[in-house]
Amino acid sequence: MRLAARAAPWLLALSIPVVGTINTSFRFHAEPRPGLHEGVIAFDVGGRFFHDARAAGVRCITMPRTYNTYWYHFAGLSWRGGAGRSAIRWRLMQLYLRGRLGWLRRAAPRSPGRRLR
């Protein structure tokens, strides 16, 4: 099964007047493609929508590589950072957050049958 290209659905800005006519779900979709070596192409979350939008002529823009110097994502949390943070300072922040999350997980009351990861 070949996986089609797609936009990241968790980081997506849409112009409703532009994409409002695209009647496609964000759910997983797979379809046979005899011309492919794998025989099937899969559209992961938002993949089919992204494909149909491009086919309809919607202009799609990719975030520049410098995006990662302004925004940080760690364990389901995102926040805006300052430009030009040093790698050492960023690594120290990651270690601090990892330690803090570990402490919070250990301190949280545990309900029977539910395991915190």
Image (tube, rainbow, N blue to C red):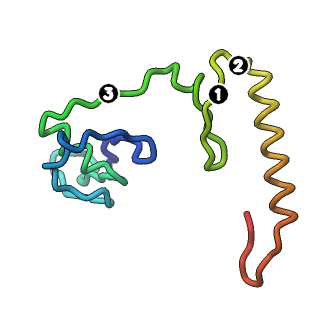
Above/below status of 113 relative to 84: below
Point out the residue furthest to the front here.
17
Residue receiving disc 3: 61
Which SS class for mark 3? loop
User: Callout 3: few (<14), some (14-19), or many (20+) C-alpha neighbours within 10 Å?
Assistant: few
- The single residue placed furthest to the bottom in the displayed view is 112
Q: Work out whether mark 1 precedes mark 3 in sequence or the reverse, and give the earlier one.
A: 3
Residue positioned 83% across, 54% down in the render: 102
Q: Are marks 2 and 1 in contact (CB under 8 Å)?
A: yes
Q: Amino acid at mark 1?
A: Gly
Give the residue displayed 77% in from the left and 84% down from the top: 112
Tell me where residue 45 sits by quadrant: bottom left
Identify the residue shown where x is 44% and y is 21%.
Answer: 64
Give the distance between the C-alpha atoms of the residues marked 1 and 3, in whole angstroms.
22 Å
The residue labelled by disc 2 is 85
For discs 2 and 1, the disc positioned in front in the rendered view:
1
Q: Are marks 2 and 3 in contact (CB under 8 Å)?
A: no
Residue 50 in the image: state x and y as whole percent: 26, 43
Tally the marks: 3
Question: Local crowd at mark 2 within 10 Å, few (<14), some, or many (≥20)?
Answer: few
Q: Residue at x 79, y 22 (%)?
A: 88
Q: Is residue 95 left or right of residue 52?
A: right
In screen coordinates, is 52 left or right of 95?
A: left
Q: CA distance from mark 2 to mark 1?
A: 8 Å
| Residue type of the residue flagged with mark 3 | Ile
Q: Position of residue 69 (x, y in %)?
A: 60, 22
Residue type at mark 2 is: Arg
Mark identifier at residue 81: 1
